[in-house]
Image (tube, coloured by chain):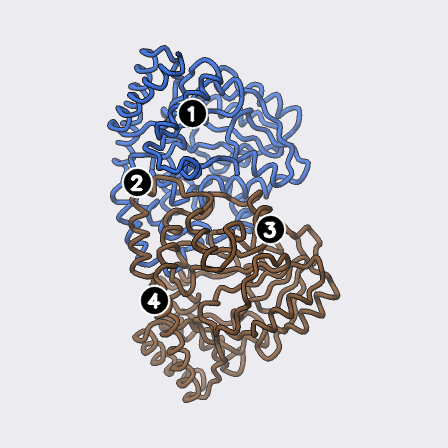
Chain colours: A blue, B brown
Amino acid sequence: MPFVPPEALERRAGSELILRAGANESNFGASPSAREAMCRAVEKVHWYNDPEGFELRGELARRHGVSREEIVLGSGIDELLGLFVRLFVEPGDGVLTSLGAYPTFNYHVEGYGGMLQKVAYRDDCEDLQALALAAEKIGPKLVYVANPDNPMGTWHSAANIEAFSSGLPSGSLLLLDEAYADFAPIDAIPRIDGARRNVVRLRTFSKAHGMAGARIGYAICHRKIGAALDKVRNHFAVNRVAQAGALASLRDESFVHSVVEQVAEGRREYGEVASEIGVVALPSATNFIALDVGTSERARALVAGLLARGVFVRMPGVAPLDRCIRVTIGPASERRFFVEVLRQEWRKVLL
Amino acid sequence: MPFVPPEALERRAGSELILRAGANESNFGASPSAREAMCRAVEKVHWYNDPEGFELRGELARRHGVSREEIVLGSGIDELLGLFVRLFVEPGDGVLTSLGAYPTFNYHVEGYGGMLQKVAYRDDCEDLQALALAAEKIGPKLVYVANPDNPMGTWHSAANIEAFSSGLPSGSLLLLDEAYADFAPIDAIPRIDGARRNVVRLRTFSKAHGMAGARIGYAICHRKIGAALDKVRNHFAVNRVAQAGALASLRDESFVHSVVEQVAEGRREYGEVASEIGVVALPSATNFIALDVGTSERARALVAGLLARGVFVRMPGVAPLDRCIRVTIGPASERRFFVEVLRQEWRKVLL
């Protein structure tokens, strides 16, 4: 498994976590109307879900200005990543990503026998220039870029992403993971163009919409790619409750807007606290913040200290990113609690 | 897509179905305690599901007398079938099934490039003898058998299934689809033996538990197979709501027992009505019944006539099974309605 889940941490510790701030789950919850829609859907849970996801895809298509045929639903971006790898990567094919980027993508590539090439981050950002050079060199079938980035929270401008995708060799498909797009400044998100054949955009209801446990995400892609996916995907993968919840959540724009606002406030708060205690808060366009504590030893000690207090956070897996801890930003009361524990545990690390 | 879903029929017709009796969904619904558990789970839907499904797998293991490592959860049997095909079938490998059996299995085999061999049914049952001979001949990587069978509803004894599996060539893995096991007589279901390396049993919460739209099923298999699946599966595929519902439903034994009783009563009723109107009801160990109307022309006409009345049923796809229609058995009020419409539409077919 690419991750140790918080439930496994609880089982190891024999006690429940007090705060889950390690998986970028939205502790603002799902919107009240989405929760209501999901409970209503439970009343009809004896019926299979619509395998075509017709209504939800229609709503997404309208919102993105594309056609329904350019939207593919999946049980989270994770499932979609696996499908794209299955569809495009033969054993031995080259695939490009960044060193320290989303492990589940790597998991799928390894599972299908692709050859991963990993490009180092530069200044805590995915290095588009180095990725472009590597792509030119190896002609990868897939190029994975997350914008905004996970685990660092940094981002590139829409213009840079556009230029990067245009410069990719023919035969390379860009998987642009936009899981955190809802939290990003407008000029970080390229205009959606369904007709682009070499870019797939991946979105999710797991983050700003607060529906990680429902398992629903989608790809925006060329209709030919959508049709190809339709020939191999598990058609009933996106459950009825998730489809109903996603539709309601899309329509509750003020809820998501409010979450995004509160997260921005939280980023400012954590930034101030960080500078007070002598830690560098990285700029973030996501619902988490990377706190640079200087060394991986300190980061590990801090993650362990927080966990011993029942606070779950994660840290990047590789150097030099692993001098940071990654903290999900939740509601104000949660932030007050976290800041208190952070101050105490950070003091212990410095002793 | 292997099926035309009822929602697509509704979209074509421009009106809602009055009765869904074509996909063997349980119109008894999910148990009240399962529905309550699912609504409670919705309150925490912003958290990812436990990717290890620890608690549910523990409960299933206890009930089946196996270890947790011998249980693999999936988002329905459909997903699990795809995973087993991915794991065991290389392009060109032989795979064995019955002619007219579950199309989604065939879909996965074709998707991964396996070579399907299909053995004809015999007396409306999967022909274990002919399957054994074919297996001996082609040495298939996978052999698919559903017991009880879908779409015919017939079944084999546990002893015959045991003998069949023991006689398979080494290197052939039996995928024993027991989606309808809850409805079957006890002596149709082999004793569970987790240590058997050449049998995988597939179970679901979609049928007797009334949770088709939640997407949750499981495999009971050797722990080495479970460990191999764990290296390729989509770990977060089984959503939080489904896991909570399944756990509650397992514990509400009297609900499932009552559904099974009412279905048995419905099978008797439909059997009587069938003989009154001169149609042969096949023996069934499932929550549906195959009604033999004599010819595929009649079956098609009857399916179309029922659909025009807002009643969705299906029929098998190939001869000679396609002289039947397949009707899901629901609660008493639904059965009264169905019988009335059936009598009228059958009369029209005979005109």
Q: In the image, what residue type sits under mark 3?
A: Ile
Nearer the observer, B80 or B273:
B80
Q: Which of marks 2 and 1 is nearer the N terminus?
A: 2
* Alpha carbons under labels 3 and 1: distance apart: 34 Å
Label 1: chain? A
Asked whether residue B129 appears in the rendered view, the answer is yes
Q: Which of marks 2 and 1 is in front?
A: 1
Label 3: chain? B
* Alpha carbons under labels 3 and 2: distance apart: 37 Å
Left or right for B194, reference B243: right
Q: Residue at label 4?
A: B254
* Alpha carbons under labels 4 and 1: distance apart: 46 Å
- Mark 1 Cα within 10 Å, few/some/many (few <14, many 20+)? some
- Do the residues marked 4 and 3 share a common chain? yes
Tell me where residue A246 sits by quadrant.
Answer: top left
> What residue sits 66% from the left and 35% below the top?
A93
* Alpha carbons under labels 2 and 1: distance apart: 29 Å
Q: Residue at label 2?
A: A30
